[in-house]
Image (cartoon, helix red, strand yellow):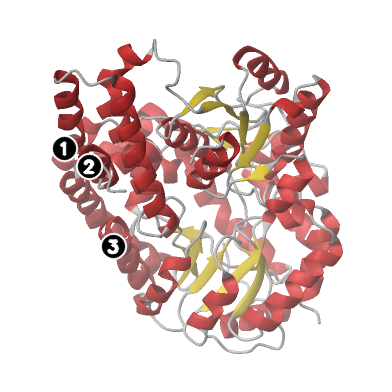
Amino acid sequence: MTPSPLAQAVGDLDEQTAVALVEEKLAKGEAALGILEELQAGMNIVGERFESGEYYLSELIYAADIFKKAGAPLQEELKSATQASYGTLVLGTVKNDIHDFGKDIVATVMSSNGIKVVDLGVNVEHQAFVDAIKEHQPELVGMSCLLTTVFEDMKEAIRTIEAAGLRDQVKVLIGGGPVDEATREFVGADYYCKTAQDGVAVAKQILGVK
Amino acid sequence: MGQMAPPPLFIERMTRLKTAVACGTPDRVPLSLVMDLFAARIMGVKFSDFASDVDVAGRTMLAALEKLGDVDSLQFATYAPDVLGMLWLAPMKIPGRELPEDSQWQMDEQVRIQPEDYDRILEMGWSPWFGEYIGKHLGYAAAAGAALQEAGPRWAMEYMKKGYVIFSPMTIDHPFEHLAGGRTVKEFTLDLFKMPDKVQAVLDVMMAEKREQALHTVRAVGPMGYLVGSWRTAPEFLSPKLWDRFVWPYMKELVEIVAEEGGTPVLHYDANWDREIERLKELPARRCVLELDGKTDIFRAKEILAGHMCILGDVPPALLTLGTVEEVRAYCRRLLTEVGPDGFIMAMGCALPPDAKFENVKAMVDSVQG
């Protein structure tokens, strides 16, 4: 299917055109939800180009910024829409680690791909993940770290979710500098995401998004 | 300080390292470590004491080396984590000061450089602007830099007396790393798209000073290893278009200056460099050391750079922390045969994690003995 001009503009990182097209569509009275879907289709193009090696993290960051800027005028109308996101991700850097670089990028990229992000910040207490799951009922929990010394904390956070009887309700995605498949196994997470775009692909797969 | 003749063990180890740097085959593969809090942990020193006193750090790392066995070299003689603030323009949080006593230090990255600072750097020049910035944000970092400048050579001498080579104690910083740290990766990346010409002009102003500083430093300090590192400049993070413009020309020039003046550029390249490994052939042959952290395919790098560049690395930190002795041994065997025995220095990826298992590190150290 040929992408719409708006989706194409986002995919091509053409900020000016994307912003102008959204304004034009709103002026014509088009529904915010439909415009949002076009913006998300644009982010799909960005994701495909990342997968093919044409785009890198730098382009993911810029595309997410374009998405946010172009989508800003839609926010008021979207508040009342029920289907504005595919699902929810509770996200945080685990206890004893204050690094937010990777976590922030994941939040930005996930948000611009239609996933509502509840960002708990850094140095997140294990119980805070549990409280957030109870409050927001997410399908996904994302945990990040940059230090090998907090692998135990990541494991403990997941164990705390399990002890609260919530483990079956969520899929746990992990990522960060030293994290790998062996870490996933050690901490008991469901998925290891090498890049932010990996996270998007996994999240969409779990949420059944085509 | 009077000059002392290096002991035979030091000369033996230095020869081994130099042979590897020149892509030759030494009597055995040399070993080089970066250790900080790992040393504190295995020697029972409080992290807060280690992080706040360069002499405690120097003494602890030396004792840890002796405990580990036949290690040829350490990359730094002593350490003060606050000094990392001078690289990424962000203050550090230190155990016993901002963090609990036995936790790992961490960088407090926030948006401290605003877009208007670019104009100020262009108007004032880099050093005057940086002086003001240090005053506002990096008091501890500047003090740590001064302490290391005094203690580094003193401790290098202590290591030499015991036969250990301090391999790459000096650093030459890429201007991109400063801006990405002080501005945050996300904001700085957006600047590369939204105001590329201005960012490049700022990098050029910084580079004019960096060029002179690098030249004078290598001339003054002499022929040793100079760490020319890459963290946020890794190809993994930037598309070729951005990387070719904002990273590589500056990196290449800094490396060339160090090599031309007789130093050994140690390319401490964290994150994934697979895409640009071929480019490293543009750097001076048999003069540099490529230091990988486990994220780049070191085996492929060897295939491409064999005979051109010595490779150092890359037992992954997570393997040292979570793996078994047998897994570490198997990985080291593969390194020794596929990346060595010529032009190879055995090492951990990046630095030994504080919680690495002692027996795993010991297995890595012992692996070079055959």
Whether marks 1 and 3 lie on the same chain: no
Instruction: Say what amino acid the circle numbered 2 marks.
Output: Ala
Q: Residue at x 17, y 39 (%)?
A: B124
**Which residue is identified by label 3?**
B244
Whether marks 2 and 1 lie on the same chain: yes
In this view, the residue in front, B323 or B31, is: B323
Q: Disc number at residue A17? A: 1
Q: Disc number at residue A9? A: 2
Task: Evaluate if marks 2 and 1 touch, with contact meaning CB atoms under 8 Å apart.
Answer: yes
Tell me the chain of label 1. A
Residue A187 in view in this figure: yes
Horizontal and vertical percent position of residue B243: 32, 58
In this view, the residue in front, B57 or A160, is: A160
- Secondary structure beneath label 3: helix
**Label 3 vs label 2, nearer the camera:** 2
Left of B208 or right of it: where is A24? Answer: left
Instruction: Say what amino acid the circle numbered 1 marks.
Output: Thr
Q: Is residue A90 above or below residue B190?
A: above
Instruction: Say what amino acid the circle numbered 3 marks.
Output: Asp
Horizontal and vertical percent position of residue A87: 53, 26
Residue at the extreme front: A1
